[in-house]
Amino acid sequence: MVDAQGHSIFLYRLEWPQTRCAPPSSPLTSRSSSYNDDMILWLTISKFTFTLRLDEFTRRHLVDRVHPAPHASLRGTQTKRRTRPAVTMGDRGQTSVKNKQPAPMQITAEQILREARERQEDDNYTAPAQKITDPEELAVYRLKERKYFEDRLRMSKFAIGTWLKYAAFEEQQRDFPRARSVYERAIGVDHRNTTLWLKYAEMEMRNRHINAARNVWDRAVTLMPRVDQFWFKFIYMEEMLGNVSGARSIFDRWIEWEPDDHAWSSYVRLELRANQPDRARGVFERWVQCHNQPRSWIKWAKFEEKQAQTALARAVYERAMQELDERDHTEEFFVAFAQFEERSKEAERARVVYQYALEALPKSKVAELHKKYVQFEKQHGERKGIEEVVAAKKRFQYEEAVKADPYVYDSWFDYVKLEEEMLSDEPELEELARCRDVYERAIAFVPPAPEKRLWRRYIYLWLRYAIFEELVAKDVQRARLVLAECRRVVPHEKFTFGKLWMHAAHLEVRQLQLPAARKLLGQAIGRCPKAKLFREYIQLELQLGEVSRCRELYQRYLQWAPDNCAAWIAFAELESTLGELERARTIFGLAVQQSALDMPETLWKAYIDFEIEQGDLERARSLYRQLLDRTSHPKVSAC
């Protein structure tokens, strides 16, 4: 191939040896000193080729390698050898390459990189240790290291890690003025870096330069008073030196900035280690003035309790209830107060605290308080008290449930069941009022749409309410009012509930008010007739022995639903039971003549069974013939 400048280009795969240099027999190494000036080696990595550009001399050498000279024994013979035309330096542009095919062996960039990686030196190589034997070598070593650090800092002066290494090196050389100079220069670069100040002060402390360390800490806390670590280390150093008054003064400086609870609790512990409980109480006094929060008062009360000062601890809790805002009366505070009274063997005081907290706090924020109160009553209370606590907890759960979705009537059922179970044998007005309140709240949530499937559970709330008034509260008049209000709420023009009318009628029957019961049932049949209402009304009159009323009701029933076979059969069976066989036979005859029936097969079977029961087989055969004339059903033919 010929490039754009007219130079010949050969593709040649280099066979690199396992060592870092080529073998002596390689043409690129055996005589490299004689033709380095004549060879230009360009390595170009393209997509998948490694191109080696050589000059004319190198090409001739490669040709000689591919076509070696004949053996000495054959030198005298004539051999035909292919030779290339001589090409001088001036006629490179006129050289033509006959074979333009790529070399059979190509080398890829991936292979070059992989072989280079394989031939790298071991990464675990460590330089040998340098031993310094005289002051001159030490001076040279120090100069070298300092020059290295200074050059690094000149390139990037904001690299704090380099400053720290530089200062550590000077400290290692025990040249503390230079180390301080490095730290000061670093602080001039970044004075807000906390690590820099910490390392600076620790260097002074480590080498017992106490006054210098105090100076560094003082500068640090003055410059960055919100960094708690500076204050803690400064105080720790003074305490370790036995300078308690100095540590106390540092705490006094710190609390002027109103730090968080860690600073105050550390100050208290310092006074306790110094055996100064009175000073610790003074710290607590300043603490609650700075942070008027429940946790501060609780820690103060626990401190007094540990000091065996029960009266002072109780006084702290009572003072906290007076000085804290209403929004700061938290569940945590009341639990701590009640548990303190419990530990002090004051069960009644603890019970009062629990009850006050349950009344004062919102219901949504007393879950843990309820739990603690239940445990307390199980340990110290009576059966009734325990039941009250459990009921209160369940009330809270039901309140949350009905608040989430008031139209889930099962939650209301559970709620009213709980209230009814908590009633005593002779319930008081307060207990009855609580039950009525739950019932009233439940029935206030009328279903949002006039669809019967939405009203089925709702109606049972009304019925249960009426039963409660009648049987538990013994207030019949109120039960009548409840049922009347329920009848007013139900949209009877779209649907009705037979059980509602029957429950009201049975209430009147139990009160021996038969006219009122008949009036209710008659109103139900006239306003919204249903098969169930007719059946229940007839059954009621039958129980009362009013046969004529039963016949009238059956007549109205059949006028309303002439296709109801069950009504025809029941009417006929009534007459048969009364011994009125002709009436029964007439009723059956009228029934089978109806043009539309819902279940004609049951009617015909009842008619035929009636005749067979009476022993009139001829009438039964006649009925079968009539039935066969009307239908060709195989079961009828089989009969």
Image: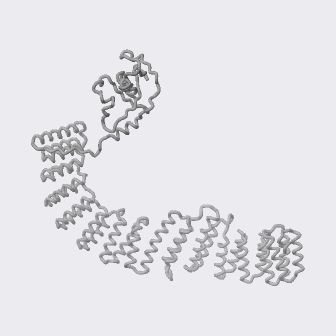
Q: Nearer the viewer, residue 571 or 5?
A: 5
The count of marks equals 0
In the rendered image, residue 129, in percent from the top left (x then y), is placed at: 19, 45
Residue 179: x, y in percent?
Answer: 15, 45
Q: Is residue 103 above or below residue 387?
A: above
User: Considering only vertical position in the picture, is 4 above or below 128?
Assistant: above
Q: Is residue 116 above or below residue 347?
A: above
Write down the quadrant of residue 119 in the picture: top left
60 on left or right of 584: left
Answer whether residue 64 is visible to the viewer in this image.
no
- Residue 374 can be seen in this image: yes
x, y (%) of residue 251? 20, 58
Name which residue lies at 33% across and 69% down.
336
Give the side of residue 350 with respect to residue 158, left or right. Answer: right
Residue placed at 13% from the left, 39% from the top? Answer: 140
- Left or right, 182 with respect to 74, comes to left
Q: Which residue appears at 77% of the width and 74% of the height? A: 567
Task: Tell me the quarter of the image containing the C terminus.
Answer: bottom right
Q: Nearer the viewer, residue 12 or 598?
A: 12
Q: Split into 4 quadrants, where in the image is the N terminus? A: top left
